[in-house]
Image: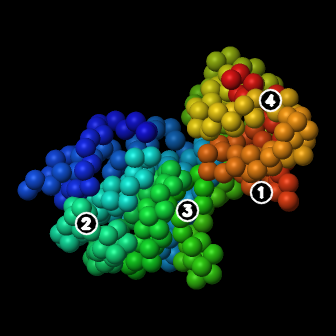
């Protein structure tokens, strides 16, 4: 579970809180729902963070009640939404999702508490959450949906890291809530994989604003501003080359700034900074390799010698079948270095046309894999 400052994970017990103070973890009248208080607050925006034009797009394009923000790790999804909340006059209700929220009453208890902090939503939702016999789809979700619809204060309800939700009841509940967003309010779902919504229908109805990796990638001026805020200044040509190499991946550019601050050569930054850098390897381990199975780590280690990877080629190298399915799985919600479009991102390329191919960061043999 992700660590959140200022909160302790406590006993959940299926009961709910009706406290409107987000710092309170014990509730009156014997109701118990110990919460992680910081899950109900947007993370603080780090000093020097680049303000994105996307914030204005999110704020102004309020005709669509659903916002989907989907991108691999390091694209600044949480930072963007935190910036939006910090600079908006609109009320925000925030839930940072983690693995422990794969219990529908726990997840919906956090949602109810976040909304209740904006405006009291009544006792019926909390009574349904507290009842050990209440049905989530038959009682809790309808009451929460009705409470959301009846709110007189427009609210932006953000659920961050929804890719961590694999419980079907949780995912279905969010899909139903998406149909109960009142005019003027927004439901924002952010994560590394497509949200649990009927996206095709919402898209056809013009009800969803979709933000993806292409929107979140930094432009050249933004990349230059990011490096300067980190104390690094590159010439125009070097900056252009580094931006092209990282394709605007915010985490990659920030790691490049740290690399240069540690003594990396300024004049050859775009050539010398790559997948074999210690900072990149550590990032890949923590954000990707440690989140996948032992089988997938072994697969990546044994195939890391390949510059390009495809199902048939990996089958031949490993002398085992099934590589295409593994590559497809690695391009899913936990993948922090690839996207399913056939375009390079940071360290790899994936294409999908019946078979999948994957190319390592130019000039590296994927040391983040071979070091395991």
Gap between marks 4 and 2, in whole Å? 50 Å
Residue of label 2: 133
Identified at 62% across, 50% down, the residue is 333
Which one is in front in this view, the residue at disc 4 or the one at disc 1? 4
Horizontal arrangement in the rendering, residue 353 relative to residue 7 (left or right): right
Residue 260, percent from left and from top: 68, 23
**How would you rate the neighbour count of disc 4 (Cα within 10 Å): few for under 14, some for 14-19, many for 20 or more?**
some
Query: Where is residue 134, by image quadrant?
Result: bottom left
Of residues 332 and 115, which is closer to you in this image? 332
Judging by the rendered image, the residue that carries numbered circle 4 is 302
| Side (left or right) of 241 relative to 138 | right
Name the secondary structure under disc 3: loop
Q: Does the residue at mark 2 contact the one at mark 1 (Cβ under 8 Å)? A: no
Q: Nearer the viewer, mark 4 or mark 2?
A: 2
Please give the residue where the numbered disc 3 appears in the rendered image.
Answer: 195
Q: Which mark's residue is nearer the viewer, 3 or 4?
A: 4
Residue 309, visible in the rendered structure: no
- First in sequence: mark 4 vs mark 1: 4
**Quarter that holds the C terminus:** top right
If you read the primary sequence from the N terminus, does the residue marked by circle 4 or circle 2 appear first?
2
Residue that carries the numbered disc 1 in the rendered image? 341
Alpha-carbon span between mark 3 and mark 1 = 18 Å
The answer for how far apart the CA atoms under marks 3 and 4 are is: 32 Å
Q: How many marks?
A: 4
Query: Horizontal placement of 50 versus 222: left or right?
Result: left
């Amino acid at each position: 579970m992700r660590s959140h400052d200022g909160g302790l994970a406590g006993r959940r017990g299926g009961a709910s809180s009706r406290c409107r103070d987000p710092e309170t973890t014990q509730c009156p009248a014997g109701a118990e729902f110990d919460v992680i208080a910081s899950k109900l607050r947007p993370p603080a925006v780090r000093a020097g963070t680049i303000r994105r034009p996307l914030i204005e797009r999110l704020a102004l394009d309020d005709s669509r009640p659903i916002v989907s923000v989907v991108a691999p790790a390091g694209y600044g999804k949480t930072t963007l939404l935190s910036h939006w909340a910090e600079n908006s006059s609109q009320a925000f209700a925030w839930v940072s999702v983690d693995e422990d929220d794969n219990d529908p009453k726990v997840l919906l208890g956090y949602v109810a508490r976040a909304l209740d902090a904006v405006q009291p939503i009544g006792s019926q939702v909390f009574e349904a959450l507290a009842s050990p016999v209440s049905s989530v789809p038959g009682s809790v979700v309808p009451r929460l949906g009705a409470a959301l619809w009846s709110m007189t204060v427009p609210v932006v309800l953000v659920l961050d890291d929804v890719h961590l939700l694999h419980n079907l009841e949780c995912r279905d509940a969010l899909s139903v809530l998406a149909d109960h967003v009142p005019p003027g309010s927004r439901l924002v779902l952010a994560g590394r994989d497509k949200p649990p919504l009927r996206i095709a229908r919402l898209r056809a109805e013009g009800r969803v604003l979709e933000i993806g990796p292409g929107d979140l990638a930094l432009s050249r001026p933004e990349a230059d501003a990011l490096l300067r805020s980190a104390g690094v200044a590159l010439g125009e040509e070097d900056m252009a080359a580094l931006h092209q190499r990282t394709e605007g991946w915010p985490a990659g550019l920030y790691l490049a700034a740290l690399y240069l601050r540690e003594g990396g050569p300024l004049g050859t930054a775009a050539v010398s900074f790559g997948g074999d850098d210690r900072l990149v390897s550590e990032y890949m381990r923590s954000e990707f390799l440690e989140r996948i199975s032992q089988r997938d780590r072994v697969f990546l280690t044994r195939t890391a010698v390949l510059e390009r990877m495809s199902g048939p080629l990996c089958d031949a190298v490993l002398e085992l079948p099934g590589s295409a399915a593994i590559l497809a799985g690695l391009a899913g919600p936990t993948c922090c270095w690839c996207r399913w479009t056939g375009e390079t991102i940071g360290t790899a390329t994936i294409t999908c046309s019946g078979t999948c191919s994957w190319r390592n960061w130019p000039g590296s043999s994927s040391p983040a894999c071979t070091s395991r």
